[in-house]
Each structure stands twice: as structure tokens, then as C-alpha cells.
Image (cartoon, grey):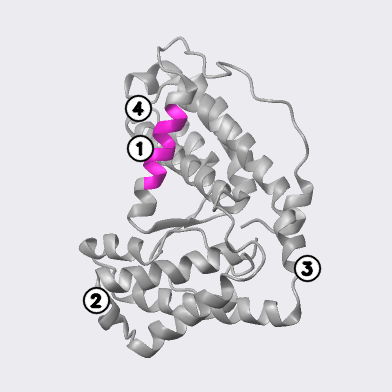
Amino acid sequence: MARSSRESAVKSRPASTGGGNGKTLRNGKSAADARKDLLERAGRNRDGASQWRSDPLEDAQAARRVADLAQAHAPELSRRGLTSAYNEAARRLADEIEDHLQALPAAAVTARGRSTEQAELLADAAATAQTAREAVQRITRAADGRRAAHAFGIGQPFSARQAQHVLRALRLILEAAKLYPEVASDAGLIPEDLQTMRDLAGDVEKLPGAGAPLTDEAQALVEAQGALRAYFDLLAAKATLAFAGDPEERARLLSLLPRADERRHLRRSADEIPAA
């Protein structure tokens, strides 16, 4: 998640142009269709418990430069399946990410309004959930373990400062432990641990905002950034082949893609949980 200094640096900007409002571009596919495809690809990545550790603002800023260069090579890239609609969708996703970053400080204001007792409860519950997630990550690395990892909440947005996220994380672990008892056993989750999480979930549920629908900015930000990373992956794959005869141009385009550490089941300690 971007730091607050980056959030405050985001300025209002005009809406992106070119095929706006879902209009069909000249290649026959609308930017809305391309955006939907990218979101679906991002969803499948999350189903595989795959995440990226990168700055969302840097991704958004890079997306516009990447989309402009990709558009300059539209005929060749379109021939290989990356139409101009995807470039426009990337620009829109960049706009969405900046909008979500602007709205995120509201979550921090909510967090500052909690009492010391409420804050300690949420921190305890978040640490408990994250510890269980770490244990599950360690024993679901194989391909057939990705579905189970996803069921335990791996790949889902998780902020220790948002009661909604913590409550969802606890509930997912409890439900997944029933569906995948072997995984729970391999992870070392014993009945006492699960009962502790049930008790914590009951207490967190009473916190202000814990029962609100999970349609918050952090969730939307993760989805938009995941879609943008899917665009980067598609472009990199197609450019590798499209520019096989022009290695300098290929290197130029690939150099614009923001670097990110792909992390499948990355182990992180509770004090490293990003705060919204």
C-alpha cells in the first residue's frame, strides 16, 4: 500500500480520453470489455494466491507511459491479441487507482477514533489471523494447494487497521479449517486456536464499522492494481514476441514496466501488515 506521503501527492486530474464511456474503439472491442477481462485475470491470480509487492501509485503513473508506447505499436500488438482497448483500459485503471488512494486516508481517520481498548483488541485479532495465514502459506506452496490457500484468505486484501478486513480474515480461516482439515492440521491449527479465533471474531464484530460491506477503498484499490499488473504481464508477453526482430524497442518498452516482486504465499510477520 502506498505511504501517506504518496497519497497526499495525488492530485485531481482530468478523465482519460480515447474511447471513453465504454465506447467501442476502432478495433471493435471496448475499453470496458478490456477492463473486465483484466479484472477477471486479476481475480484468477488472486484465486491462485498470487500477489504483487509494488507501489500502486508508481504502477498508475507508469501505466500511462506504457500505454502510450504500446499504442504507438498498436498494429503489431493488436495482431497478437493486445488491442488498443487494453491500453485505454490501463489508463482508466490508473485513474481509478489514484482516486482510491485519495480516499484511503478516511480509513486512517476511523482508526484514530478507536479507544485504546478497541485498538488493542483489533491488533490482537489481526496478529492472530496473520500468524495463522503465515502457517498456511508455508504448507500450501504446491500447485494443488492454491485453492486451499485462497480459501484461507491468502491473496485477499488485509489491513490490520480495518476491522472489516480482520473480521473477514478470521472468518475465512475458520470456514477453511472445516473445508480443508488436513491443511489446518498441517499448519498446526489446533482446536484451542480455532476457539480463540471464534472468540476474537465475536469481539471484533462488535467494533464500529466491522459489519459494513466490504466495498471499501482498500479492496477496490487491490482489484484495480491487480488488473493493471495483469495488463503489464499481457503486454510484456506479447511484446517479447512482437519485437523479437527489434530487441532495442522491446527493451525500451519492457524498461517502462514497473518492477514488482511477485509473491506466491509470501511470508510476512504481523508487524509488516500494511496499514490502509
Foreground mark, 4 or 3, reads 3
In the rendered view of the protein, which quadrant contains the N terminus?
bottom right
Count of numbered tags: 4
Q: Residue at x 73, y 52 (%)?
A: 6
Residue 50 coordinates in the image, percent (x, y): 39, 56
Residue 41 drawn in magenta: yes
Mark 4 = which residue? 242
Q: Which mark is residue 237?
A: 1
Mark closer to the chain start, 3 or 2: 3
Mark 3 = which residue? 113
Dividing the picture into quadrants, the one containing residue 182 is bottom left
Q: CA distance from mark 3 to mark 1?
A: 47 Å
Mark 4 lies on a secondary structure that is helix
Mark closer to the chain start, 2 or 1: 2
Q: Which residues are the magenta region?
A: 34-43
Can residue 269 be seen?
no
